[in-house]
Image: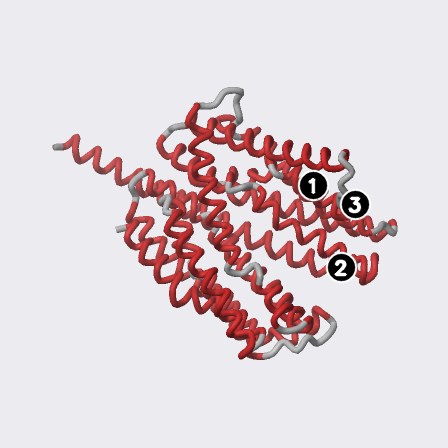
């Protein structure tokens, strides 16, 4: 009996310790992520006018288009990073370090092969006489391809419960990009150099981050041989995560195009500003919640469902408080702040500000339950839900555009999230933790 009591007490102490470690990891990663996002925001405030005055309006348009392609870096990773966030914490919790090494090896092999194939395709097209983009867009394309194997660095840090290190390297990228842009302005460089400044900072920081994480954590360094099942497991997880990303992206990615085609160029300009603000705000909240995913994986691997259940609701409460508070500031002060930043009046109306506030609050509402469902490998139900929301949103946005204009288009997505997506996410998450 005494032995049973001692063992029970030791298990309870271990559970408490693991819970504290998860909480510490979440707090540290969240704080570092917010700091990094603010640094990125301040850098953008400086960088945009510097580039505009250096290369002119036409050059600034080319620069903006070429650098906006950077969002493709996550998409080109084909979900490999997300697969590692799902697999490595489980291996750490269960002591399966050999499997973790195999997962990292498989991810790097696939990403290097993909990058090599894309570079070879570009070379063959050029040799065949096919006209390829030159200057800024060539720089952007080559950099994005080279970045494919480097892009897993953030996922590795996050899966090791050290997301604050990924945020640190992202801050290094922001500072490098700002320094290169200021150098370009000082020497009077053209658009191509200004584009290379942004992508050069991306490649240097990601390469440094990947080398850093592999140097410190020898148990995940890639090896010449990998377990035969590692590639199949990684591709299975990454394929589902890639599909999930596409489904979620389709719900919001075409709003600028809809505003341009269905309304007018002026409406498209309003939508562009609104989406930039919304994505920046949700990115801030995403920086706070990114550490929940590997922590939920760890909790499920150790059967600590009580912690997962508690953090699900506490984390959601924190997200709601952040999004509602930020949205309130946006509604109250957004119009004059946007006029000051843009140095012109795009007639951002009160209904549009309220639509932006609803967008931010609605889409961040599923951050924590989404992380929990990812950790529980509930990918297919999420894909079905988001695919339905995207398909329904197309028709509803067409109707709303001709009745309510830009605010109508923007409101459709949060309406679907509040009425359909979020309730189903919370219902599934509740079933998982109980």
Residue 130 location (% of width, % of height): 76, 41
Asked whether 205 or 263 is in front, the reply is 263
Question: Residue 86: which quarter of the image?
Answer: top left
Q: Which quadrant is home to the N terminus?
A: top left
Figure check: 123 above or below 241? above
Name the element at disc 2.
helix
Residue drawn at x 31%, y 58% is 427
Q: Which mark is residue 120?
A: none
Q: Which residue was labeled with disc 2?
A: 61
Q: How many marks?
A: 3
Figure check: 316 above or below 215? below
Q: Are marks 1 and 3 in contact (CB under 8 Å)?
A: no
**Separation of residues labelled 1 and 3 (CA atoms):** 13 Å
Figure check: 225 above or below 122? above
Mark 2 or mark 1, which is nearer the start of the sequence?
2
In this rendering, position of residue 180 left or right of residue 406: right
Name the element at disc 1.
helix
In this rendering, position of residue 49 left or right of residue 171: right
Figure check: 181 above or below 415? above
Q: Which residue was labeled with disc 3?
A: 134
């Amino acid at each position: 009996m005494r032995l049973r009591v001692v063992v029970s007490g030791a298990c309870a102490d271990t559970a408490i310790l693991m819970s504290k470690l998860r909480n510490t990891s979440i707090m540290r990663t969240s704080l570092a992520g917010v700091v990094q996002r603010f640094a990125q925001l301040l850098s953008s405030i400086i960088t945009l006018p510097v580039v505009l005055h250096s290369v002119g309006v036409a050059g600034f348009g080319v620069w903006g288009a070429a650098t906006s392609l950077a969002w493709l870096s996550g998409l080109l990773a084909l979900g490999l990073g997300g697969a590692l966030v799902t697999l490595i914490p489980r291996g750490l919790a269960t002591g399966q370090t050999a499997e973790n090494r195999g997962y990292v090896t498989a991810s790097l092999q696939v990403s290097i092969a993909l990058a090599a194939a894309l570079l070879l395709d570009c070379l063959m097209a050029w040799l065949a006489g096919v006209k390829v983009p030159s200057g800024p867009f060539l720089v952007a394309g080559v950099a994005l391809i080279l970045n494919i194997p480097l892009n897993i660095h953030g996922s590795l840090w996050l899966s090791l419960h050290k997301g604050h290190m990924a945020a640190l390297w992202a801050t290094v990228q922001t500072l490098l990009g700002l320094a290169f842009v200021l150098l370009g302005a000082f020497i009077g460089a053209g658009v191509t150099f200004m584009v290379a400044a942004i992508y050069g900072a991306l490649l240097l920081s990601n390469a440094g981050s990947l080398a850093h994480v592999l140097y410190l954590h020898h148990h995940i360094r890639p090896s010449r041989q990998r377990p035969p099942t590692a590639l199949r497991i990684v591709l299975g997880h990454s394929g589902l995560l890639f599909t999930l990303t596409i489904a979620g992206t389709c719900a919001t990615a075409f709003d600028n195009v809809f505003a341009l085609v269905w309304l007018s160029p002026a409406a498209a300009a309003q939508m562009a500003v609104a989406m930039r603000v919304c994505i920046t705000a949700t990115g801030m909240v995403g920086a706070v919640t990114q550490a929940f995913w590997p922590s939920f994986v760890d909790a499920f691997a150790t059967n600590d469902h009580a912690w997962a259940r508690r953090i699900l609701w506490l984390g959601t409460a924190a997200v709601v408080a952040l999004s509602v508070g930020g949205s309130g500031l946006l509604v109250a002060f957004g119009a004059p702040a946007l006029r000051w930043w843009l140095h012109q009046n795009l007639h951002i109306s009160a209904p549009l500000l309220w639509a932006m506030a609803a967008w931010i609050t609605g889409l961040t509402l599923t951050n924590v339950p989404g992380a929990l469902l990812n950790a529980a490998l509930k990918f297919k139900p999420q894909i079905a839900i988001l695919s339905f929301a995207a398909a329904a949103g197309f028709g509803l946005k067409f109707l709303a555009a001709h009745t309510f204009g830009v605010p109508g288009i923007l409101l459709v997505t949060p309406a679907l999230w509040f009425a359909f997506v979020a309730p189903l996410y919370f219902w599934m998450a509740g079933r998982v933790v109980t």
